[in-house]
Image (cartoon, rainbow, N blue to C red):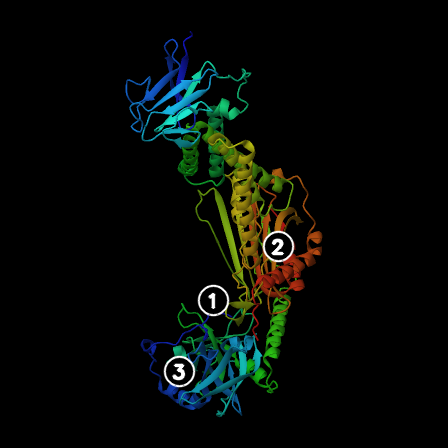
Amino acid sequence: MLSAVAVRAQAQPPAGPFNAVVPAASQSAREVLVQVRPAVIQIKSFFGSNTAQASHGTGFAVKEGGVFITNYHVVAEKVQYPGKYRLEYRTAEGQTGAIAVLAIDVRHDLALVRAADYAPVPLRLQTESEIKGDRAYSVGFPLDVGLTITEGISNGKVDGSFDPRIHYSGAINAGMSGGPALNAAAEVIGVNVSGYRFEQLVSFLVPTAHVLALSNRSLNGQAGIELKKEVAAQLHAHSADLLAAFDGAMKTQAVAGYMLPDKIAPFVNCSAMGSPETDSPVQMVQVLCDAKAGLYVQQGLYSGSLKYAHYGLTTDRLDAWRFANRLSALTAAVGRFGLLRHVGPYACDDRVVGLKGFDANLLVCARRFRKLEGLYDFTVRVSSVNSAKQGYASHLDIYGVAFEPGMRFIRRYVEAMEWRP
Amino acid sequence: MSVERVVVEWLDGHGRVQWRERLALGEGRRSFTIGRSVEADVTLDDPHAAALHATVEIADDGRLLASDLGSANGLIVCGKRWRNTRGLELADNTLQIGRTRLQLRTVHERLAPERPYELPASALARGPGWIAAIAGLACVLQLVYATWLSAPRDFAVSAVSLASVVLAVAAGWVGLWGLLSRVMQGEWRWLRHGAICLGVFAAFIAVRAMVEVGGFVLALPPPGNGHIWLGAAALAGALFLHLTHASPLPARRAALIACGIPALLAAGSHWFQAHDQVRDVNHIDARMRIYPPALRLRAADKLDDYFNKANALRERANKRLADALADEPGSDGEN
């Protein structure tokens, strides 16, 4: 997901009437809404036989015969627990019926579904790149307050994103996930997927090309077990692509006398800061990098991403004992929070190893995914043990990758480190 | 005719003599009276005693025979109350009247042979003050070192705060054992318990620090739950010393209690942690401690060796998941 605080249909409870504020639409927006209204449905998820919904999102018709597209995360619980969840649709006019999942594309957060007894005319898909600054609209059922259209600007493809996304400067709220984003001609330019909740109108769309690719797949439908296997296979493919993107020489930067991995791919976001106080006994520089390539699998479980951080320390005032103690405090190993229903406990290996020109303490911890066969989380800590005045602690966390490629990447990451005072 | 001499000793709850009176019976007289009245030969200051409560007669063979003079509370001999009884033999020469315990000694008593005098074997008994002072100093030094190591902005305040907290907890612990000593042995024995508490604590943190530094120096694997057992050993040592100095328990029984309680606590803690960690998917049982590089004695492993053994890590991760699932009652069954 691109968003740190993604707008997720599932996470939202039904909204109260105080949230039912729909902004006034322009003349153009009104015309777009009238055109797409029959093709847009609300998709609700229910746990067991409850009549109260567990979550809700939006979908729109892409093919004849009642075939709709929505986000994978709208139907994820149904895919993972087909016996415990059921899906229903509701049109803007109040017609309801059952929904079946036909195919999924976890990487692009898309799912193809079929609605029983409802087959509107599909929306037209516009696959050509949008020009930055074009008027755009987003349609969906935000916060369960009814069919809504928001008006904004398409800002074209997001720069530096591992998976392609379109930047939409307009409101996409929880419940609109899976709805269509349209141009002024009421053609679909993308699928609503996420947004930054605490920023101003920074939202993201899945490009239409992926909708087209998914809708051209076989529409025979898959049994629940096959869909789950499909999820695992797609996660494996995604993580393999992610790690392959880091192949080649690993770019490094100087941190406290050591060369440490830098921005190792264009889509990795890095930030750096340091301690400005000159009277501090220890000067610290920290570099934080995040690939932000993780895929939503189901509630509480993301897969296929990595992030790393370096904490470099230098001192001219502390003795070796106190400096080592400061460095120790930065090596605490805490993995990404997980649930036993998703992952197993960590197993670790901790040793002092020789790197380029220096020795370092290397801790590698791995835990296996419970149901997604062959995927592991890794938590790695590297800390120098060679200098009494300079040192670093490096944290690397990799989520949801196969074991061998994961270990190969860890090795390359560690081998890139060098003592160059 | 000779004059019988009797020494009457007042005993406290622990059987120790509080004070004694020497009584010389008149010529030919072989009995004396005990009671609250000044007319009695032995006058008691006990509201539970009658004015003339009992007589004690010294038989020809030296046995002491007590008779109740019709008191309301009677005599207590060998833990049993006797009323209106005459000629009751005092097998251990002790007698309780009301709440007063008396031990009667005559020239007929058999004295145990003289025992050779030896200086106390236990240093705690010989010089607890010195040990307490040295141990306290060791504790304070180690706490000051721990504060210094963390390089706080205000070193003095941090050191005093930490030392105050630790010493306050130690004072509470010593207070409890002192109270137990007072109840069971009649003495507070502050210094002994202080020496035990501070000495064991100082030894514990010193050994723990040595284990950590030694692990770094020799690149040994982390001790895991070893600290729990080290703490249990320290507690066992402290409990044994406290018990033997605070209670009349024999050494073997004190050792049994002192080892049993920490062993149970450590085993429980170990089991709880192991059981809890089987299913804790976020816990990482590894803690990297770094010390000055100059201390390192063992060469680093080669990176190839590390990654050649990666399969073992995968197998352990798989096993941990299998263990967690096996530990889970009625594993999910989702479809």
Q: Residue at x 47, y 32 (%)?
A: B247
Numbered badge on residue A4:
1
Give the class, few, some or many, for how many residues have Cα within 10 Å of label 3's Cα (few <14, many ≥20). Answer: many
Image coordinates for residue A34, horizontal then vertical, percent: 40, 90
**Callout 1: chain:** A
- Above or below, A415 against A119 in this view is above
- Above or below, A351 against B138 in this view is below
Image coordinates for residue B177, horizontal then vertical, percent: 44, 34
Same chain for the residues under marks 2 and 1 in the image? yes
> Which residue is denoted by mark 3 in the rendering?
A149
**Callout 2: chain:** A
- Lateral position of residue B86 relative to residue A302, left or right: left
Q: Hey, what amino acid is under mark 1?
A: Ala
Q: Hey, what amino acid is under mark 2?
A: Cys
Image coordinates for residue A141, horizontal then vertical, percent: 41, 81
> Which residue is denoted by mark 2 in the rendering?
A348
Numbered badge on residue B255:
none
Q: In terms of secondary structure, where does tag 2 sit?
A: strand
Q: Classify residue A303 by image quadrant.
A: bottom right
Q: Distance between the residues labelled 2 and 1?
A: 29 Å
Q: Hey, what amino acid is under mark 3?
A: Ile
For marks 3 and 2 on the same chain, the one whose residue lies earlier in the sequence: 3
Q: Can residue B212 be seen in this view?
A: yes
Task: Tell which tag, 2 or 1, sits nearer the viewer.
Answer: 2
Q: Which residue is drawn at 57% across and 85% down?
A: A215
Q: Is residue A71 visible?
A: no
Report if the CB atoms under discs 3 and 2 are less than 8 Å apart: no
